[in-house]
Amino acid sequence: MQRVFRTVLLVLSALLCACNDSSPAPSSTGAETPKADSAKPLPDAGAMVQQMITQNGSKDFTAEMRMTSENSDGKRDQVEFRLQRKYSADGASSFMTVLAPKEESDKVILAVEKNGQPTEAFSYLAGLKKLAKLDSSRQLGFRGAKVTVQELLGMELGQYSHSAGERETENGQSLIKIEFKAKPNLNLAFPRIVGYFREQDQQPARFELFGEGGELSKKMTFEEIKTIQNRQSISRVAIEDVAQKLMLKLETRKIEYDKGLSDKIFTEDNLKASVTAASQKLDAGK
């Protein structure tokens, strides 16, 4: 189960992004989209990327989510968690807690992202009273799964430079392909990411993540978009972990935007207190 917990933040930023508020969700009728018009000006790639990085201007959000995994043998697993995220002028802070299963409720991660600086992430071991500090490239392993801190933080797209985009036509649909290149000295695990956005509504269609050797590591497909508090938000994503032969589904069960989250949530003191309280409850229930 910890394997799934270690993977859940892989697409959180992308999953919860508030896309163009006035754009309708993509049609599910199967109607073919007209082919791309190469003579038209390209959409603003920077604006599309910024929507994903900043939740289209959201100040904060609290989301309850569910991750379901299935390995190559058909074995399924599931975890539910709460993600709290707050934006600032120079970055973002995240606080994630597992809600179910109960025995995993002492799994908590605090992360602080600052533009142009290496990200700092923390976990806490209550029994050892030890605070563990992790950077973006740090690999975490459990039951054969290997996941970097960067994946847990939604890929940190703000730490990449990106292309102006180019138009491609796929299955009759016009897509804007944007290539992301990792900026140096930020300890990022993925030197290259390729994103595809639907030109019709400028919302993400899929992402491809590439490893240090240039190999394709993961594919993310954005399957469903819902209007939540007047925001077009991606509510379901399918993830194919190519290297680990693992399929995952990430779904948003509930989300609330701009609730005025306190800065005290995103502190080491709160991390320690939350993990300690959860650990004590688990010990008492044994």
Image (tube, helix red, strand yellow):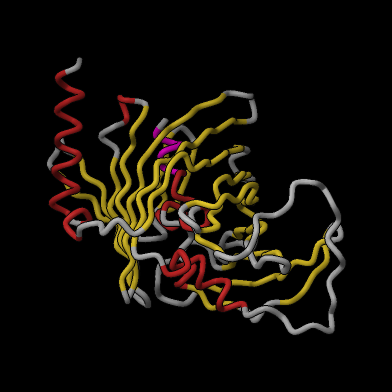
Q: Write the start and end of the magenta stretch as one range.
A: 2-7
Residue 107 position within the rendered picture, expressed as x and y whole percent measured from the top left: 29, 38
**Observer-nearest of 261 and 85:** 261
Against 67, is 16 above or below? Answer: below
Q: In the displayed image of the protein, which residue is found farthest to the top? A: 286
Tell whether 10 sits left or right of 118. Answer: right
Tell whether 128 sits left or right of 187. Answer: left
**Observer-nearest of 221 and 41:** 41
**Quadrant location of residue 34?**
bottom right
Quarter of the figure that contains the N terminus? top left
Residue 6 position within the rendered picture, expressed as x and y whole percent measured from the top left: 41, 42
Query: Would you say residue 2 is visible in this rendering?
Result: yes
Q: In percent of the image, x 49 and y 37: which residue is there? A: 67
> Does 121 lie within the magenta span?
no
Residue 40 position within the rendered picture, expressed as x and y whole percent measured from the top left: 79, 82
Magenta residues, dominant SS class: helix
Against 23, is 147 above or below? Answer: above
> Does 6 lie within the magenta span?
yes
Residue 141 position within the rendered picture, expressed as x and y whole percent measured from the top left: 42, 41
Number of numbered discs on residues: 0
**Observer-nearest of 132 and 152:** 152
Quarter of the figure that contains the C terminus? top left
Q: In percent of the image, x 43 and y 68: which residue is there? A: 54
Query: Would you say residue 11 is visible in this rendering?
Result: no
Q: In percent of the image, x 36 and y 26: which residue is there? A: 101
Tell whether 114 sits left or right of 198. Answer: left
**Quadrant location of residue 203?**
bottom right
Q: In percent of the image, x 58 and y 77: which residue is there? A: 162
